[in-house]
Image: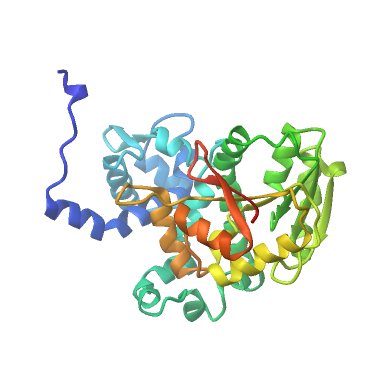
Amino acid sequence: MGEQNAVPQALPPDAHLMQLGMGMFQAQAIFVAAKLGIPDLLAAGARTTADLAEATGSHESSLFRILRTLASLGAFTEVGDRTFANTPVTEILRSDSPRSMRDMILWMSEAPHWAIYSRMIDSVRTGKPIWEDVHGEPVFPYLFETDKPLGDVFNRAMTSFSQVTIPAIIASYDFSNAATIADIAGGYGHLLAAVLQEYPSANGVLFDLPHVLDGAPAMLESKGVADRVTMVGGSFLEEIPVVADIYMLKHIIHDWYDDTNQMILGNIRSSMPDDAKVLIIDAVVPAGDEPHFSKILDLEMLISPGGMERTAAEFERLLAASGFRLSRLIPTPSPVSIVEAVRA
């Protein structure tokens, strides 16, 4: 068997433990590279750290140490003496990549967000998110009212993640029998616009808070679907006065615990036709110790908004308590699945 086919050996327990315990250095190193725009500077080819330091106003030796560490982890590659190039990992860290994850990396490690990670133990002790304790108010008012620049980073991060999940959703679900498709708390309507582009005979309803909807028309116009979308402003905790064949909830249910979600789902149920469907689009946590993105994301839900990622059984219980029945669980070629529900 050739060397290239050799099976990687598991780390010794002590090395594995140290890698886990020192993960903050890896996260901050890739954040520094993203913040400085290093992948963009390497778009045309390899450059020395002296060139990169001059271009970014950085200390050359310190920047070299960051890039050397990242190269050892597969992000960047050292192709010569203190000379680095992009790898497939850092190609999608470029700001101009169609699949760019730069904004997601920035969101995860910007200082106000980073500040809450050291308080995770408090969330474990209390069962409550720590964001409000650290910043004086819950995460969403903080992002959209108090620190709007950080809120913009968050919005861009969610949009970049949608570039991965939206094509997977459309490839995995047949919307052809729906005349009206509603996107509940759909932001500017990126998912709804993509679905309507794929299904030109359908119309859409975009429901969100009025100040959020202010940013939607330009995006919907740019996608050529504005004339097929009705915008409805309101709070999903009060009323959802929308009649549709399909109701989409993308990355909404995981932000809340079951009591709040029962209110949201109940408000949909009050308006929906008997034969309508609800699509909960979130990660589904696999059983056992199988590695999965959802298990890491679940810790973000614990400490920030105060929600959770759910297993299939937990979705089934939530739906049953809200007057629904889980009809199908549809995986997609992305980190999210589609939980389809109908009236019980």
Q: Is residue 62 left or right of residue 230?
A: left
Give the quadrant of residue 238: bottom right
The answer to which of 324 and 215 lies nearer the viewer is 324
Indicate whether 194 appears above or below 159: above
Indicate whether 86 appears above or below 219: above
* Numbered-mark total: 0
The answer to which of 58 and 167 lies nearer the viewer is 167
Give the quadrant of residue 137: bottom right
Q: Quadrant of the C terminus?
A: bottom right
Give the percent coordinates (x, y) of residue 225: 81, 40
Q: Tell me if residue 343 can be seen.
A: yes
Give the percent coordinates (x, y) of residue 23: 29, 56
Q: How is the image coloured?
A: rainbow
Q: Residue at x 32, y 47 (%)?
A: 290
Give the percent coordinates (x, y) of residue 304: 49, 68
Q: Is residue 60 left or right of residue 166?
A: left
> Which residue is situated farthest in the top direction here?
1
Indicate whether 142 appears above or below 292: below
Give the percent coordinates (x, y) of residue 148: 64, 66
> Which residue is situated farthest in the front direction here?
344
Q: Residue at x 15, y 18 (%)?
A: 1
Q: Tell me if residue 310 can be seen.
A: no
Q: Residue at x 73, y 42 (%)?
A: 193
The answer to which of 15 and 48 lies nearer the viewer is 15
Q: Is residue 173 left or right of residue 92?
A: right
